[in-house]
Amino acid sequence: GQQVMQIPQYQHVQEGEDFTTYCNSSTTLSNIQWYKQRPGGHPVFLIQLVKSGEVKKQKRLTFQFGEAKKNSSLHITATQTTDVGTYFCANNTGKLIFGQGTTLQVKP
Amino acid sequence: DGGITQSPKYLFRKEGQNVTLSCEQNLNHDAMYWYRQDPGQGLRLIYYSQIVNDFQKGDIAEGYSVSREKKESFPLTVTSAQKNPTAFYLCASSHQGAWGYTFGSGTRLTVV
């Protein structure tokens, strides 16, 4: 079935440094969604991308969908301790299939 | 406030016992989903239902059962046939045509 691979699995950064997580698929995706899960919490929807080459921003977060619609990235500029958590990409085909997630730790 | 309620938050059961996890939503969403999350892994789909009285198996349905008798409710039963039931279980819902899923706060099941 459709799979999305996400890297890296873990990332430790110093507060103020940038962070990027990548999501890749071997097949063309109709869409990609991004979620954030705080430690001990539940996933919260951040955004959906549907167009080839699409770029969307939410404050310090930048989301990109590749031209071939086979990859996506989430970039956080100048991380803060509030950014700690696991970030998941997911593909919605009537059911949501998640990548493995990237867990971000931020050292103050 | 609208949302999804999962209960209980923590659940302990003895091996060999069936257990039912509750999921209720007042968002008037058509579709509901059950996911399982294990440490270091992503969310894996157990079952989903897009309309009342209908549901489909996800990727890891073995050892689980569901029902969808009401639009608001989608309970999950973890049966004794599930070999590794200890996990964090998340329920979600979505509105047809909408983008993001809304998740409940989850139930942590521990089987001893």
Image (tube, coloured by chain):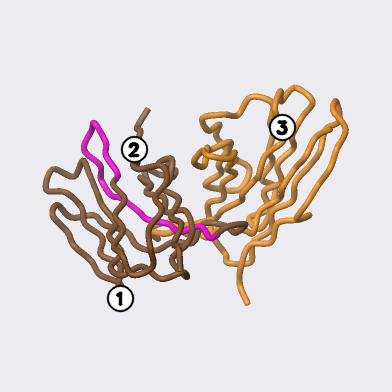
Chain colours: A brown, B orange
The numbered disc on residue A59 is 1
Location of residue B77 (image quadrant): top right
Q: Where is mark 2, residue-wise?
A: A4
Image coordinates for residue A24, horizontal then vertical, percent? 27, 39
Q: Residue at x 11, y 48 (%)?
A: A67
Can you say whether A72 is above or below B25 in the image? Answer: above
Whether A24 is among the magenta residues is yes
Q: Where is mark 3, residue-wise?
A: B85
Image side of residue B98 versus residue B23, left or right:
left
Q: Residue at x 53, y 51 (%)?
A: B31
Q: Chain of mark 2?
A: A
**Mark 3–mark 2 CB contact (< 8 Å):** no
Number of marks drawn: 3
In-front residue for pair A13/A67: A13
Can you say whether B95 is above or below B110 in the image? Answer: below
- Tell which tag, 3 or 1, sits nearer the viewer: 1
As helix, strand or loop, the secondary structure at mark 2 comes to loop
Whether A95 is among the magenta residues is no
Which amino acid type corresponds to the residue marked 3 in the rendered image? Pro
Which amino acid type corresponds to the residue marked 1 in the rendered image? Lys
Q: Chain of mark 1?
A: A
Can you say whether A23 is above or below A42 in the image? Answer: above
In-front residue for pair A50/B11: B11
Q: Residue at x 52, y 42 (%)?
A: B43
Q: Chain of mark 3?
A: B
Task: Read off the magenta span.
Answer: A23-38
As helix, strand or loop, the secondary structure at mark 3 comes to loop
In-front residue for pair B14/B53: B14
